[in-house]
Image (cartoon, rainbow, N blue to C red):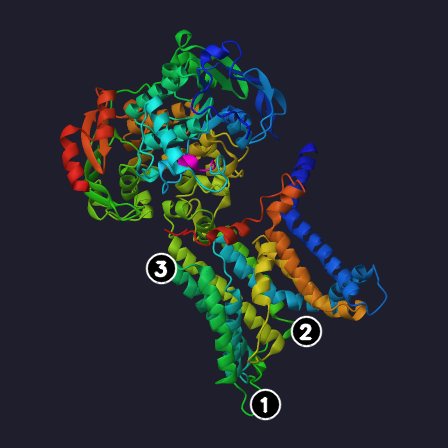
Amino acid sequence: MTAEVTPGAPAGPEEHVQAPALEMRGITKRYPRVVANDGIDLTVRPGEIHALLGENGAGKSTLMNILYGLARPDEGEILLDGQRVEIAGPADAIARGINMVHQHFMLVPVLTVAENILLGEETMANPVFLDRAEARRRIVELGKRFGFEVDPDAKVGSLSVGWQQRVEILKALYRDARILVLDEPTAVLTPQETDEIFSVLRRLADAGHSIVFISHKLYEVLEIADRITVIRRGKVVGERTPAETSEDDLAELMVGREVQLTVDRGESHPADVVLRVEGLEVKDDRGNKAVSGVDLEVRAGEILGVAGVAGNGQDELVEAIVGLRRPVGGRITLGERDVTGHSPRDLHQAGVGYVPADRHRFGLVLSFPCSDNLVLTDYYQAPYARFGMRDDGAIRAAAERRIAEYDCRTPSADARASILSGGNQQKLVVAREFSRHLRLLVLDQPTRGLDVGSIEFIHHQAIARRDAGVAILLVSAELDEVLELSDRIAVMYRGRIVALRDGRTADKNEIGLLMATGGEDRAADTAGGAA
Amino acid sequence: MNDIAGRGIALVRRVWSLVALPLISILLGLLVGAVVILVSQVIQPTKPFDPTLPITGYIGLFRGAFGTFEGQVDTLVFATPLVLGGLSVALAFKAGLFNIGAHGQFLVGALASVAIGVTFNTSPAIVAIPMALGAGMLAGAAWGFIPGFLKAVSGAHEVVTTIMLNYIALTVVAAMVSGPLDQPGSPSPITDDVGTAALPIIIGRSGHLGILIAGVVVLLVAWLLYRTTRGFEIRTVGANPDAARYAGMRPRYILVLTMSLAGLLAGMSGATVVLGVTHLMTASFGSTVGFDSIAVALLGRSNPFGVVFAALLFGAMRAGAPQLQLQAGIPTEIVDVLQATILLFLVASPYIRRALRLRGVKEPVAETDTISKTYGSETVG
C-alpha cells in the first residue's frame, strides 16, 4: 500500500499525453477446456471512456479479472502509465489505482454511506480508530466535485439503486482510482438514471480518470464511449469509435454474423381475454403491501408488457399470477375460471407457462441433468411418468427433441444444467415452458443477462407464441425489451399500474418518466397510499 | 472399437470422480491411525518399539473381518444396522435435511421392537417377527415425523429438534426398560427376551435375517429415489426448494414425508439390532450406530449403493477389531479413531481436493454442504 496519496487529484491528461493509462498486451488465459482470452490487446488512454463490448462468455470478465488481480494471465503483460506491472491481487490493484464497480453492488445496506466507503480502508490512516470526520469531509468534497452530492450519514439501504451505484463510484474515487472499471453499470437503472450516471462518468473522464465500461447494450456504448473494443470468443475482433460505427455493425462484430436487432413482428390480433386481474393486492416477504390494487387484462394473441423499475411490485404480481404467492385481496381469472390462490400445479395444468426472472432460483435445478430440467414441471404426468414411476426413455426422448428444436448447446441431454452458459440455461427454461399446451405465458425478465443471439431467439419464439394465440404477460426492467415486444404497455409504480399505453406509439421518454415518478397526478395519491 | 474404449475411459473417469475423495479419506484415516498407534507405543513403552505395528494391526483387522467365514458373517452383521441407518441419513440428505436424529430414531425403533417382541414372544414367528419389526419401523417413523412436521409448520431446524429428540429417546428407553418393560425379579433393569420374535439365523453362527432385509431395503430406496416421481420430488426439494415449488411440488409435504421415511429406516436399523443380535434391552442400551450412520451416509455420498460399501467398511472394522487387539495388542478403540478421522477428512474434502489438485473429481461431497449451509438458512418457503 505505497500508492502516492494525492487525495482526489488524479493525474491530469496534460501530464500523460503519451503513455496510455492502461495497456494490456497479448493477454492470453487458458482454462482446461477453453481459451478465455487469446492474445487480447487493450489500450485505454487517460481521460478516456473505453467500452468493452462482447457477448456473455466472450472473455470480458476474464480480462477484467486479470486486470483486477483475481486471475493471472498465462501470457501477456499489463502496463500502467507505460510501466510494466504485476498485479498481485485486488488489494494491489486498488493500491495501483484500479477500481472495479461490480454489477452486483458490494455494499452493506445497514451501514451508512461513509461507513461503506471506509470498509476495507479502516487501517489505512490509523490502525486503531476510524477518522470519520475526515472521511465525511472528503466524501462531501468528492461528491461536490463530480456532481453527485450524497449524504454521508444516509443508510445505504435507504438509497435508490442509482444512488447506491454512485456510492460505489465514490468508494472508488475515495481510494484515488485512476482507472475505473464498470461492469454493466446500467443494467439496473432507469433511462433517466442512466443519463445521470453518464454525465457523472463524463465528468470523471474530463477530470482525467480512465473508465472501462463493460456492456452489451449497443446504443449505450455508442452514446458514452470514446472508443469501443469488441471481443468475441476471447479475441479482439474490432476497435471502433462511435463516429465510424453503428449498432448493426457492432452487433455483427459481437455475434459474428448479421443480427436482426429489432423483432419483425406483425400486427397482433387480440381475441378473448385470457387473464383478468382485478384489484389484486399482494404482500412481499416482509409483509408490506407490494401490489396494491392492480387491474389488468391480457387477451389471447397479444403481449402486454409491464414496465417498471425493479422492486415496484412486479415480482409479487407475477408470483401471485403463477401461484407462488397467495394474494391478500382481489381476483385472478383465467378464461372463465377464478384461479386466485390456486397452486402452481393447478395453473400449469390450466395452461399457464412461466419463465421466471431468476432462472437459477426458480427455473432450473442446476445440479440435475438437462433432461430432468426439461420436464421439471411435467415430470409427474404421461408420458414422463406412469403410476408414480418415471419413464426415463420418454423423458430422454422429449429432452433430445427440445434440445434440438430450441438449439440449446449442451454436450448431451445428461449433462448437468450448471455447465451450460446462461443463454443455453435460459433456453432450457424456454423450451420447457413454451412446449406445453399454453393459454397464458408469463415472461419475467426473459432475457436478463443474455447475449444478443439468445435474446433474438427468445424474442422470436415469444412472437411466434403470440401469433399462435397465446396471451403473453411480459415483465421486464429493460424498457427496450418491453417497447420492442409489447402490443400494450402497462407502467407499474409502487405496486400500482399508473399508465397504459399502446405499444406501437409509446414514447420511450414518457414511459421512462412514468417508471421513475409514477406520473405527476398519480405521485401524490400513491405517496399517500404508501404512507 | 474406439468408441467402446472411449466409453470405458469415460466410465472409469466417472467412477473415479465419485470414489476418489472417499478413498483418499479412508487412506488418510488409516495413515493417521498408524501415527496414533506408533505414538501410543512411545507414550507407554510396554514392549520394544515396533515400527511395523500399524501394519501388523491393520492386517489383523483385515483378517478378523474377512479372513474367516465367521468373520465375514460378523462383518455383515455389523454392517446391517449401518446400512439401514446410513440410508436414513442419506435419504434425508437427498431432501436437503440433516438427520442427526438417526440415533434417537434407532433407539425408539429398538425399544418398540423389544416391547412388541416381548409381548408376542411365544406367538408363532410368522406373526411375532413382522409385528415387532413393524413396531420398530413405525416408532422410528414417528420419531422422524416430529422434526419434519415441526420444520414444515414453524421452520424449526431439524438439527436442533432431532438432537433434542435424541436425548428424549435415551431417557424414554431408560424409563421404559427400568419400568414397565423390566423383567420382574432381575437384579438390574433388563427386558425379557424377544423369544420367537427374534430374527432367524440364515447364515453362519450369527448371520440373521436382517442382512437380507437390509439388502432389499437398499434396492427399494434406490428405486424410490431414482425411478419414482416421489423420489424425483425428494431430490428436487433437496437440490432447490424454490424450483420445486415452482414446479408444482409441495416442499413442506415432501420434507415431512422424507423425515418420516428416514425415521422409519433408522427405526428399522434399531429393530434389526435388538431382534437379530441382542434379543433384549438394558436400561443403558446404547450404540454408536445412529452417529456412525452419518459417517456412513457421507462416505457413501448419500448414494444407496455407496452406503452399502461404507457400511461394509465400518462393519468390517467393528468385526475385525477383536483380532486387531489379539494379534497386535492394539486397543479396539483405535477403530473409533479411524472412523472419526475418516469422517474428518471427508468433511474437509474441499481442502483435500485443492491440496492434491484433484481436477475432475466431483465437487466436495455435496452433503457436507447440507451440513454447513442448512443451518440457519431457511430453505422451505
Classed neighbour count for the residue bearing mark 3: other residues with Cα under 10 Å, few (<14), some (14–19), many (≥20): few
The location of residue A531, given as percent across then percent down, is 18, 42
Q: Residue at x 41, y 60 (%)?
A: B256
Badge 2 or badge 1: first in the primary sequence: 1
**Quarter of the image where the N terminus of chain A is located:** top right
Q: Residue at x 76, y 61 (%)?
A: B39
Q: Tell whether A516 sits left or right of B66.
A: left
The reply to whether the magenta stretch includes residue B241 is no
Pick out the residue farthest to the top.
A244
Q: Are marks 2 and 1 on the same chain?
A: yes
For the residues carrying marks 3 and 2, which lies nearer the camera in this image?
3
Badge 3 or badge 1: first in the primary sequence: 3
Is residue B18 depicted above or below A75 in this figure? below
Q: Residue at x 48, y 77 (%)?
A: B172
Amino acid on which disc 1 is placed: Pro
Badge 3 or badge 2: first in the primary sequence: 3
Mark 3 vs mark 1, CA separation in Å: 45 Å
Amino acid on which disc 2 is placed: Ser
Q: Which of the chains bears the disc numbered 2?
A: B
The residue beneath circle 2 is B206
Q: Is residue A26 visible?
A: no
Pick out the residue farthest to the right.
B48
Amino acid on which disc 3 is placed: Ser
Quick one: SS at disc 1?
A: loop
Question: Viewer-proximal residue, A307 or B35?
Answer: B35
The location of residue A318, given as percent across then percent down, is 29, 39
The residue beneath circle 3 is B154
The residue beneath circle 1 is B187
Report the magenta residues as a range: A116-121
Q: Quadrant of residue A266?
A: top left
Question: Viewer-proximal residue, A196 or A321?
Answer: A196
Q: Is residue A2 visible?
A: yes
